[in-house]
Image (cartoon, grey):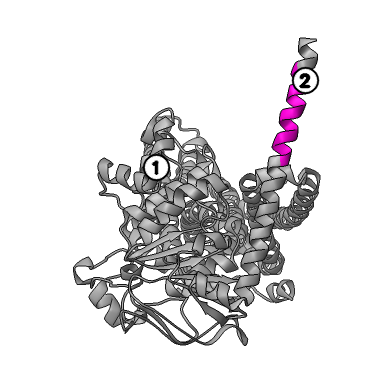
Amino acid sequence: MEHNKEMKLKYDKTIWKALIHYFSEFKKDILILCVFMISLACVDISFPLLTQYAIDHYVIPGNAQGLGKVGLLYLGLAIVLSVIVFTFIRHAGKIEMNLVYKMRKDCFEKLQKLSFSYYDRNAIGWMIARTTSDASKIAETIAWGLVDMIWGLAMMTGISVVMLIVNVKLALVTLVTVPLLAFISVLFEKKMLVAYRNVRKINSKITGLFNDGIVGAKTTKTLVREELNREEFGAVTNEMKRTSIRAATFSAGYLPVALFISAIGMVLTLYFGSIFVMNSVITYGTLVLFITYARQFFDPVLELARIYTEMISAQAAAERVMSLIHEEEDILESEVVRAKYGDHYHQKTENWEPLKGNVEFKNVDFFYKEDEYILKDFNLKVNQGETVALVGETGSGKSTIVNLACRFYEPTGGQILIDGVDYKSRSQNWLHSNIGYVLQTPHLFSGTVKENIRYGKLDATDKEIENAAKIVNAHDFISKLEKGYESEVGEGGALLSTGEKQLISFARAILAAPRLFFLDEATSSIDTETEVKIQYAIDRVLENRTSFIVAHRLSTIRNADRILVLDKGVVIEQGSHQELMKQKGHYYNLYTNQFLEEGEMEILNEKTSKEVRQNNDKKNTLRSA
């Protein structure tokens, strides 16, 4: 269906109008470039006129005395031509770099503003392709296409005017093939546009597969998926090859046809021009002028044909980049909120009220897909300083409650109140600045341990960083690293263990001194020994802070003030650990089953360790014998 829809689409002028408007801040540079290209066309048009004058006034009469002056004029024009070419190439390159800089900057800023739902809908590789190859394609096409287009139009206009002034009949003969060339361009337009759109779309898939292959390299190795990944990538690249060849075939077919039509124009000029010379209608120099202009005229025509195909190719990229830049945010602040609190990049922190930590869900509805409710008429009141744990099966709504409380998403119905006020009446940045969030899978940025801890509070001192690390028991392992806090963590924290990365992410969250703390299964990916280290730290950190804990290991939430057991967005049990254990209901079954599983795993690990020690002892005995 999507392909059929695209087949109906044609060259979209509105996209290019939008781009022209978008790049309006460069209009001064573009105007200067236009002046240089028109000047270049005027110089190019002057050479044949000089040749005509030399033939008619010096060559045909046999007068060589004036040829020296003509030679000096040629030299002067050549010097002017060289200066113009150097200047326009430098200026066009500057425009290209400025355009790609602006697009990538605006794309990145838009990605910072967009809500979580956008990232849920779009693949990473797809977004990367927009901000890299698509942006480069557009900037290159506009900057250099503009150069060729202005030069071509100026050349065609200037040559047409001169030819019509010199001899109207021969000028019309030369220009008779132009309408035919325009007709051929329209015929090729539709097929080239669809083909190049498909090329850009498949290119995004390839970028996404590269990203998945690099990020998921360990998973690929452990699941032995190398062959399957190779086959999947091969299928997409083969599709890319076929689509690219198809697009190139249309382009390859278009240019030879244009060349053939231009050749017809030159033949007609030569034939009728020769007749005019023999009948003394025009001079021999004028015939040379028209033949030269016939060749020069169709050079810019072919350049415009090439630019046309490139614009069609770039239109797909333009649609993708502009759709990202103009993407509407799912969570929008009202004018009143922006006026008081500022926006993402102009925050009025002086107007931010202190956050106490009372959170209330009031008749909240939420769905990702319409009519498929995750929460329906959900109510929950969490008091300042209270720690609430969320327990339930996958899909029960635990993470959704956390995402709504953090305002990563907004409820589709009802209200969420922070300190008794609907959080929509305050800015996202105000709320997010008061949040500490630790994920199940910790993410570290390339850089040092110190830079990662300081990420949430750039003005933090080394002492504050060290204190945050000590609170979560990370200081000891950091001190043992080769360069301590100056040690590199590697891309995504690859040089550290999962537990070490998690401890650093805890320190990073704590350093910002949040009033609301969210732990989304933050201890499920660490070993038991590390869990013991941070459990004490969690208790200290959550003290006097409103906290939401999404728990996988139920042993980590025994100290929570309240535990909510969820099933399909409904609270089926709630109370403290002791209260729920006494009820011997759903929570009791979950806890006892997990306790038994962990006990069995502990016994199994001890048995395995014992067998390993025994095997090592046997090997050592045999070696001694």
Region rendered in magenta: 607-620
341 lies above or below 202: below
Q: Position of residue 129 (x, y in %)?
A: 57, 55
Measuring from the top left, give residue 220's x and y in whole percent. 71, 46
The image quadrant where one finds the N terminus is bottom right
Q: Position of residue 325 (x, y in %)?
A: 46, 66
Q: In terms of image quadrants, where is residue 399?
A: bottom right
User: Quick one: SS at disc 1?
Assistant: helix
The answer to whether residue 6 is left or right of residue 57 is right
Which residue is the site of mark 2? 619
Pick the residue in front: 223 or 342: 223
Position of 205 with respect to 38 (left or right) is right
Nearer to us in this view, 31 or 335 = 335
Residue ranking furthest to the left: 350
Residue placed under numbered mark 1 in the picture: 90
Which residue is at a point 60% across and 49% down the rendered structure image? 295
In this rendering, does residue 530 appear at all? yes
